[in-house]
Image: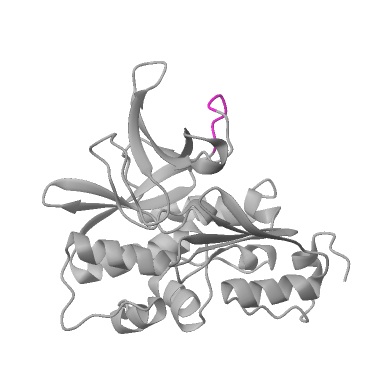
Amino acid sequence: MDQVDLGAYFARIGFEQAGAVSPTLETLRRIQFCHACTIPFENLDVLLGRDIRLDMQSVQSKLIASKRGGYCFEQNGLLLYVLRAIGFDVTPHSARVRIAVTRDTTPPRTHLFCRVMLDGTPWLADVGVGGLTPTGPIRMDTDARQETPHEPRRVVRERGPHGEAFFHQVLLRTESGEAWHDVCEFTGEAMPEIDREVANWWTSTNPESKFRKNIMAALARENGTRHTLATREYTMRQGGTVLERIAVESLEQLLAILAQRFGLIVDGRTGTETALNFGIDG
């Protein structure tokens, strides 16, 4: 497994192809959509005290063979391997996640996404931003509104207090009206392997990391819905409309939701109840 197994990956995400797969925009769109709607975002191994390994063999074993999910370094790391194997011109880039973060706060630079160049045009491909993961690539050279299978997006260029250029990927969320909200901030800086390893270590081991404090799971679906689990609450939305909300009141209920809504089978009887419980009685 020193090379990505494209056949196994395509089967995992339900990507059907006839013959060779070419590095085209249509291919990128289909792969990103299928991936985002199949492999869930989740942080369960962080809470269970397991190492998050980013080498190709480990990522393939977890996300493909074991049919688990992961967070950005695993999700977009796998996407990076896949796109390179197909022949795309792709570069890993770093970002700061700004979901529910005010502009006067500086979050850590602990997000990974892929920049794909197609015929001189840069595209943002990201399958690892939790419940706001874009389900289609986004052009990075325009600030125009862009439709994706789930929500409209924009990439807006701004300048900092000292004139430095930076970008925001933003989206339109209908539940709060026609307002744009930040998803992540980036400067266009590449994120080599050593930087991904350091950021992954901080994210998965620092007691102050949000991934150490909350149960997280998220998955988009082909019908336009989004499913999210935030510790003790499961929500299904379509656009800005909440279609279903469930309060999680027991470990058994939590494990059932993970299995039924996200396809995640977790052994809750191996001494890890406390790690997955977070005060849930059961």
Q: Percent position (x, y) of residue 249?
A: 83, 65
Q: Is residue 25 left or right of residue 167?
A: left
Name the foreground residue: 156 vs 206: 156
Residue 245 picture quarter: bottom right
| Dominant SS type (magenta) | loop
Q: Is residue 86 left or right of residue 216?
A: left
- Residue shown at 17% from the left, 46% from the top: 121
Q: In what quadrant of the picture does the N terminus appear?
A: bottom left
- Most distant residue in the left direction: 119
Name the foreground residue: 85 vs 133: 133
- Residue shown at 42% from the left, 55% from the top: 150
Q: Percent position (x, y) of residue 263?
A: 57, 77
- Most distant residue in the right direction: 281
- Residue shown at 16% from the left, 79% from the top: 20
Residues rendered magenta in the picture: 103-107
- For residue 272, say whether it is visible: no
Q: Percent position (x, y) of residue 223?
A: 45, 66
Name the foreground residue: 18 vs 222: 222
Q: Percent position (x, y) of residue 69?
A: 52, 70
* In the image, residue 105 lies in the stretch drawn in magenta: yes
- Residue shown at 26% from the left, 65% from the top: 83
Q: Is 129 drawn above or below residue 37 in the view shown? A: above
Residue 237 picture quarter: bottom right
Name the foreground residue: 9 vs 110: 9
Q: Is 124 drawn above or below residue 47 in the view shown? A: above
